[in-house]
Image (cartoon, helix red, strand yellow):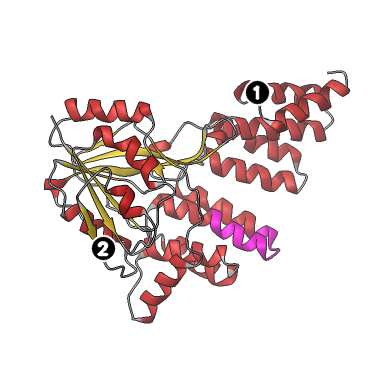
Amino acid sequence: MNTISLCMIVRDEEQTLERCLRSAAPIADEIILVDTGSVDKTVEIAEKYTNRIYHFAWIDDFAAARNASFDRAQCDYCLWLDADDVLPEASVREIERLKREMEPDTDIVMMPYHTAFDEDGAPVFTYYRERLIRRAAGMRWVGAVHEVIVPQGKILYSTAAVEHHKLKPAEPGRNRRIFERMLERGDVLDARQRFYYARELREAGETARAAAIFEQLIDRREGWTPNLIDACGQLCDCYAAQGERQKALLALLRALSFGPPRAELCCRLGAWFLDENQLETAVFWYKTALERPADDRSGGFVNPDCRGFIPLMQLCVCYDRMGDHREAARYNELAGAMKPLSPAYLYNRQYFADKGL
């Protein structure tokens, strides 16, 4: 049977750590916890589950801390989690099956990472991450921020999802500070790091600086294709914030140069044309979103609602504005079949009932 080392890096996580450890303990043959400077009860909580607790001086480098946790592992596979992650029972059962049945030469197991949820608890933002890594393969984390182990070797995709339930915000400006310290000491950011640095700039309102980086990445086609597709959306947001509506549209359309449109892009294009009151074009893009196949393993960020609930609700809006209230009501009911407790669906249902539909 395959064995698993649960490897974690933590600091001041007393609010969430026990929830995480309780969920993951059933599948962990050992628990490695690297603390990077807690001043709360994090270590005390961890001691209930493991005596493999190590202290690591924080050096503004998440990859270095994660590698320190992996270096202390002794089992066949390393499983990494953050303190505000949770393994649902279904995922625990699936990982137990992998421990029994997975071929021992599997290098990486990719698992869904659910990071946002709707009112019913269904994931609305998800993507695959490298989650189980064969220790003997010797793969290393890279990237001081948004660290990653580049998937390679024999890769298996699993349905065992990890859920991210954050209770407190991240340290404000932390990631940007780390990037800018790297630049100050002369480090060269690779394409992935420049992508995430530009995202930090956009979120801080420095849209001109962010746009320049996104433009360069897209023009040179530098980096992972999923990041470049997302860069087009980020560039759109930069131009929209500057009131440059046409540039925002062109930024979205550039994503088409990287392959067939994903449902998320179709919904964004539909939203742009809806805002412009170009309703027939908006309808085209929302209907296209409904037709796009799932592409969850592409490496990109996925909103499952973009293949169903969102375009259905937006088609309801489009047809209502076009005066076809019966068709609008039909799309609202299709959306409601997916999310019967949605406040938007219920509001629309009453709206159409008042119209006698």
Residue on which the image places disc 2: 64
- Asked where in the image residue 129 lies, by quadrant, the reply is top left
Q: Is residue 194 in view from this perspective?
A: yes
- Residue at image x 33%, y 74%? 188
Q: CA distance from mark 1 to mark 2?
A: 46 Å
Residue on which the image places disc 1: 340
Residue 274, horizontal then vertical, whole percent: 73, 43
Residue 147, horizontal then vertical, whole percent: 33, 57
Identify the main secondary structure in magenta: helix
Decide if residue 222 is on the left or right side of residue 253. Answer: left
Quick one: which residue is furthest to the right in this view? 355
Residue 196 within the segment the image draws in magenta: no
Residue 239 within the segment the image draws in magenta: yes
- Residue at image x 25%, y 64%? 56
- Residue at image x 60%, y 56%? 250
Which amino acid does the dot numbered 1 rest on? Pro
Classed neighbour count for the residue bearing mark 1: other residues with Cα under 10 Å, few (<14), some (14–19), many (≥20): some
Classed neighbour count for the residue bearing mark 2: other residues with Cα under 10 Å, few (<14), some (14–19), many (≥20): some
Q: Is residue 128 in view from this perspective?
A: no
Which amino acid does the dot numbered 2 rest on? Ala
Residue 16, horizontal then vertical, whole percent: 42, 46
Q: Which residues are magenta?
A: 233-247
